[in-house]
Amino acid sequence: MNLPYYIARHLYKDGGRSQNVSRPAVRIATLGIAVGVAVMIISVCVVLGFKHTVRDKIVGFNSHIIVSNYMTLQTSDQSQSVNANDSLVSVLRKTEGVKHVQRYSLKQGVLKTDADFLGVMFKGVGEDFDTSFVAGNLVEGRLPQFCSDKSARQIVVSKTMADKLRLRIGSKVYAYFLSDDDVRARSFNVAAIYQSNMSRYDESFCFTDLYTVSKLNGWTCDGDSGRCEVSGLELAVNDFDSLLNVEDRIIDHVNKTHDSDGNTLSSLTVYEMSPQTFSWLDLLDLNVWIILALMVCVAGVTIVSGLLIIILERTSMIGLLKALGARNSLVRRTFRWLAFFIVVKGMLLGNVLGIGLCLIQEYFGLVKLDPSVYYVSEAPVEINIPLIVLLNVATLIITVLVLVLPSYFVSTINPARSMRIE
């Protein structure tokens, strides 16, 4: 029989019914650990959810990697094109780690109504465009069928643009483009309105056919001739964590090579396209580590103080065990087992509380945020079970290790003195 385990379980089940202090001490220790674990789980889930939500919004507008004309990436001159023919697209699609490749073209223009006008960036996309991001952020209308060989004269604008220009679904809006000292005009019908809450993009990006934008740039995109002049290609990777590895492969295959027209190709990752935003997101990790450290300290101090109170109140029992021949190591293991029971119960309660609150937020969105500041309208959460398990294991190990020192306090208790006091 494991005698320390048996005694500790008996003491724990007793719950301090015959004591005046140990019962609240156990409850406070349990509650302290539960609150600490719950706060850690909520912090990790919220930060993960926030980082991934904002990251996905940036990727939705830029993709993971773009391949474009070297001069365009260096100078932001959108007048430079690349010949994204089927051969180049095939090379990129066959690159290990690449999930999707799509062509795009950009053109700056002005949207004008009878009451107002607004400068925007037109992004032309074709049949290969992954519509999942834009479709997931639609607030009105339906996405049109984007095309690369004809124009449907339909446009997708943001809610910010629609509010400024007083546009609705079906509204007709004129767009003006400056090219070689010449002004070109096009009319569009508003097919859908999206809202990403990323002001940087909502204020500037609208979507239309690849054919329209390429024609406005004076480029040719004709599958029959094998030419498809566009601003660049967007690449989506299978796993975001492997983005840098995929980038290395793209650099080896594409960077400083030339397309069929002699244009020098280069690439950029989403990290390089939005460095400030990702640096800001990385700072959130530091905040999480600080919260985790503080909560582990709170849990450790709580369980240590609770254990010391229990040891002091069980002085006579410790003296009796020693008088019966129990070694200090046996008594120490007894109180470590007792503390272990308290820690496990506190962690179970903390997991129920933390995961429960995260699920409530995920399904009901009770905590609202200012989207103009945080880019989201409600606090996002991401419940990562492996990470939560790792967090629990780390907390349990650290807490148990913290209990080693106070357990040695039993070595200072003299059996004769403790029994005489009793």
Image (tube, grey):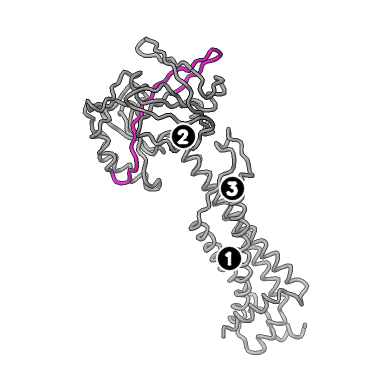
Residue wearing tag 1: 399
Q: CA distance from mark 3 to mark 1?
A: 33 Å
How many numbered marks appear?
3
Amino acid type of the residue that numbered disc 2 sits on in the rendered structure: Val
Determine crowd level at label 3: few under 14, some 14-19, many 20+ residues with C-alpha closer than 10 A: few
Badge number at residue 363: 3
**Residue 240 rendering spot, x and y as whole percentages:** 40, 45
- Magenta segment: 95-120
Residue wearing tag 2: 134
Residue at screen point 51% across, 31% down: 194
Question: Mark 3 or mark 1, which is nearer to you?
Answer: 3
Asked whether disc 3 touches disc 1, contact meaning CB atoms under 8 Å apart, the reply is no
Quadrant including the C terminus: bottom right
Residue at screen point 25% across, 33% down: 86
Q: Is residue 16 left or right of residue 400?
A: right
**Residue 6 rendering spot, x and y as whole percentages:** 61, 81
| Rendered view: 113 above or below 422 | above
Q: Is residue 265 left or right of residue 405?
A: left
Quadrant including the N terminus: bottom right
Amino acid type of the residue that numbered disc 3 sits on in the rendered structure: Tyr
| 407 or 400, nearer to the observer | 400
Q: Quadrant of residue 405?
A: bottom right
Q: CA distance from mark 3 to mark 2?
A: 22 Å
Mark 2, secondary structure of its residue: helix
Determine crowd level at label 1: few under 14, some 14-19, many 20+ residues with C-alpha closer than 10 A: many
